[in-house]
Amino acid sequence: METRNLRNIAIIAHVDHGKTTLVDAMLKQSGTFRSNQQVVERVMDSNDLERERGITILSKNTSVHWQGTKINIIDTPGHADFGGEVERVLQMVNGVLLIVDSFEGPMPQTRFVLRKALELKLIPIVVINKIDRPDARPTEVVDEVLDLFIELGAEDNQLDFPVVYASARAGIAGLSSDALEDTLEPLFSVILDHIPAPVVDLEAPFQMLVTTLDYDDYVGKIVVGRIVRGTVHQNETITLIKRDESFERAKVGKVMVFEGLKRQDVAEASAGEIVALTGLTSANIGETVACALNPEALPVIEVDEPTLSMNFMVNTSPFAGREGNFVTSRKLRERLWKEIETNVSLRVEETDSADCFKVSGRGELHLSILIENMRREGYELQVSKPEVIYKMIDGVKCEPMEFLICDVQEKSLGAVMELLGKRKAEMANMTSLSETQLRVEFNIPARGLIGFRSEFLSETRGEGMMSHVFLGYEPFKGEIPGRTRGALIAFEEGETTTYGLYAAQERGNLFVDPGLHVYAGMIVGENNREQDIEVNVCKKKHLTNMRTSAADDALRLEKPKEMSLEQSLEFINDDEFVEITPKSVRLRKKFLD
Ligand code: GDP
């Protein structure tokens, strides 16, 4: 049966192309806000970090009503995919809204999600936004979108996508760029006409796939998914079908649907609807919630294994907690355990020390997002260098391998291949996406991906697109030539200057007596030898660029620059930087997109 008064769509947009503005305008025009009520909270991107890094980390749900039809709008995670979230989220919807800036055109970062959406045979609608821009070039941008669809292997019915021209800011839209209506009505109509309503069996026994998990201090764990068939009621006893196919009885607490920006309690919800259920504390992503009497499992969605781990430690330095952020091991423990409630591919283990926890995830970006989120919440912590998780299989030391997909301009290919060669990657496939654009696929040890994203982005001038999925464990491939990274710190006291190499391997904080003059800089050398070292040195008030090579005994000083030490200073070099405050010098990881 078709649920005529319901549409489920996902939204795909490059950062700043206007997703939030558009959803806000849709909410307003659909009457979700009373006219005197302002949109105080912006719907999506509530996580600051997402905005800054240009990726969406958590998928969020909202809904609007138009002419008696409810439209659930699901935000998609950006190109970084941890544990198959993109695929799971897209399985809840029948269509996607691709928002493209009328000047900038389609951006490489949205390709990954778009490709998944096209593979899942979802129906696309293209919204050319910011049509009010004086430099808008809508015709070309539509052609570029079409080229991208062809490149990504879109099917004929997907290539026939409707185009809506809009100014989200002005709340207007039209089917032609020079005939805009006063409202977003044309957009709503296209959604209703083109996106199929979910086709479901309302009478069949209840079944739902757990797609995402959320957590709320009051109601605890929240399980989100689309009801595949049947109906679920509040306080109903259900069967949870676990990953290992075992059955577990559990009782649903609240049944909630998404209404505007909020979740709303309902007595029951039926097939096609996207719901949030409470009470199912042991439910995990990819498992099935089913009718108690007639439980049948939906195909399990695999969640990738963690391949990289880091130690998270309580900051034990004497300056910790100066800003009132001192974290106890109990607090750190609570925070991490809460995180694994919803962060599927993350594992947390205790270690021999009560102050230290081993946190494992799907790669550097996955872990660095957690670290940065925690720092912003006020957790002062120390983290160790990332290490891949090895396994002994039949007595052989094995390491995790990843399947890496890189989309690059032909001119960057040589440099990217060279980088990957050093990192023990083996090319598996190469296809041409367009006259100048190539897709190259590799099998690479997970170790080889550590620090790779930043090199890749700088080689491709930010235009390259990369994503990776876990392949499996294979015998250890041998050492990868390392890079020495560290900070050079020098202390000057009277006539004596002491230099110290503060290696990245011993990441943590280094504290400096405020009375000393401090020099600090980044060191990058190939193959663990200190050669071709470039150091930015800050001596009291001067930033100086120093160069040395293995042959040089002394550092040569170049380009003095005025800089104040009073404020926090950052020397950025690749993916790490030194932060200097009048009290401390810290080597920190720069969190990369
Ligand atoms: P998001 O990152 O995709 O959620 O983008 P936002 O909705 O935050 O918009 C990014 C910027 O573009 C903001 O400064 C908006 O005011 C601006 N913007 C959004 N829609 C329009 C539009 O239709 N026209 C113009 N000129 N600017 C827009």
Image: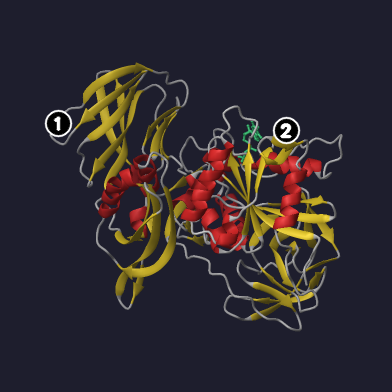
Give the mark nearest the N terminus, 2 or 1: 2
Residue 65 image offset from top left, x and y in percent? 81, 51
Residue that label 2 marks:
170
Q: Is residue 325 visible?
A: no
> Which mark is nearer the camera, 2 or 1?
2
Q: Which mark is residue 525?
A: none
- Identified by mark 2, the residue type is Ala
Mark 2 and mark 1 residues within 8 Å of each other at the beta carbon: no
Residue 368 image offset from top left, x and y in percent? 48, 48
Residue that label 1 marks:
552
* Closer to us: 577 or 21: 21
The quadrant in which the N terminus is found is bottom right
Q: Secondary structure at mark 2?
A: loop
Residue 532 against residue 13 in the figure, above or below? above
Give the residue furthest to the top. Answer: 562
Residue 286 against residue 461 in the figure, above or below? below
* Disc 2 within 8 angstroms of ligand 1 (CB): yes
* Closer to us: 434 or 205: 434
**x 40%, y 69%: residue:** 472
Residue 255 against residue 56 in the figure, above or below? below
Residue 279 image offset from top left, x and y in percent? 74, 66
**x 70%, y 34%: residue:** 169
- Identified by mark 1, the residue type is Asp
- Give the Cα distance between marks 2 and 1: 62 Å
* Closer to us: 317 or 581: 581
Residue 145 image offset from top left, x and y in percent? 53, 47
Image check: 504 left or right of 162? left
* Closer to us: 44 or 172: 172
**x 60%, y 75%: residue:** 299
